[in-house]
Amino acid sequence: MFERFTKDARDVVRGAVEHCEGAGVRTVDVEHLLLALLDREASRASFALAALGLAERKDSVRTALDETRRRAGLSRAETEALAGLGIDVSEIVSRVEEVHGAGAMSGDGKSGGRWGGRPGFGREAKRILEQSLRMAMARRERFIGDEHILLAMTVTPGPAAEVLADHGVTHASLTRVLGAGGEARAG
Amino acid sequence: MTEATDLAERAGDRDPRVGLRAVAALRRLLEQLEAVQVRSARNQGWSWQEIAAELGVSRQAVHKKHGRQ
């Protein structure tokens, strides 16, 4: 699959690992992929995000992602459901992070990474990469670009999709600015 | 948060969706907490047997779930 990734898409994957390492976390999560996507310049995803007015609102996305981490990667709906049971998720995350370090509660805990080695991709992040292949196929495009990773995020329910939707980035709005697709191209 | 809490509590008794969603969210939270604690125990040199005993599950179950994936 990775041989079909464009340079931009590979840079996102590499950038996600760097964000993960920078946060001192062992498992690459969807949030790291999104942070890496936000760093991209002059790529198809960055053009699409700019067209949706996100160029000046990147910090807002980063802040929202940070809040997601404070909710242990749970969506807002899930956090509210737990609040209904009297469970304060952010309180739990603070206590766990006090003992086990920042980011201990983020990610899905399933990691391909070994102790002391480079971080591995978590289950959800892997799912996004697999989905990006499907996004490219659906658009009849031979190569997987960073825009397909972005598209994959919008169709995979979870905190990243939620944060993106809050900023007006959905599968529908992306398709509108990306066009119908269909041309084969090497990125 | 308080507003969300009130809202959820008010809706809680009647709407099964809210209750079911809470259970699903609790399960995800539980899985995450378990992963953190198991990692921490392994880090401190605990055996799978010891971890399994504390969790009240079989050694095979805990190893299959948290062992080298």
Image (cartoon, rainbow, N blue to C red):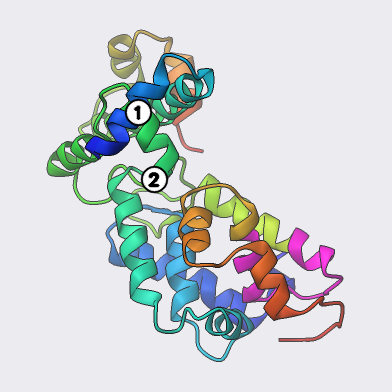
Query: Does the image show residue A132?
Result: yes
**Position in image of residue A136 (x %, y %):** 77, 68
Q: Main secondary structure of the magenta part?
A: helix
**Is residue B15 found left or right of A133 in the rendered image?**
left
Residue at the image point whose x is 64% and y is 74% from the top: A147
Residue at the image point whose x is 65% and y is 54% from the top: A155
**Position in image of residue A55 (x %, y %):** 45, 84
- Stretch in magenta: A134-152
Residue at the image point whose x is 58% and y is 84% from the top: A51
Tell me: residue A130, above or below residue A82: below
For the residue pair A90 and A28, the one nearer the viewer reads as A90
Tell me: residue A156, above or below residue B69: below
Does A67 appear in magenta? no
Which residue in the rendered view is the most extreme toward the left?
Answer: A98
Label 1 belongs to which residue?
A82
Query: What secondary structure is marked by label 2?
Result: loop
**Position in image of residue A137 (x %, y %):** 83, 64
Label 2 belongs to which residue?
A73
* Residue at mark 2: chain: A
Say which mark, if any, is on residue A18: none
**Position in image of residue A35 (x %, y %):** 42, 69
Residue at the image point whose x is 56% and y is 91% from the top: A42
Does A145 appear in magenta? yes
Circles 2 and 1, Cβ within 8 Å, touching? The answer is: no
For the residue pair A172 and B3, the one nearer the viewer reads as B3
Amino acid residing under circle 2: Gly
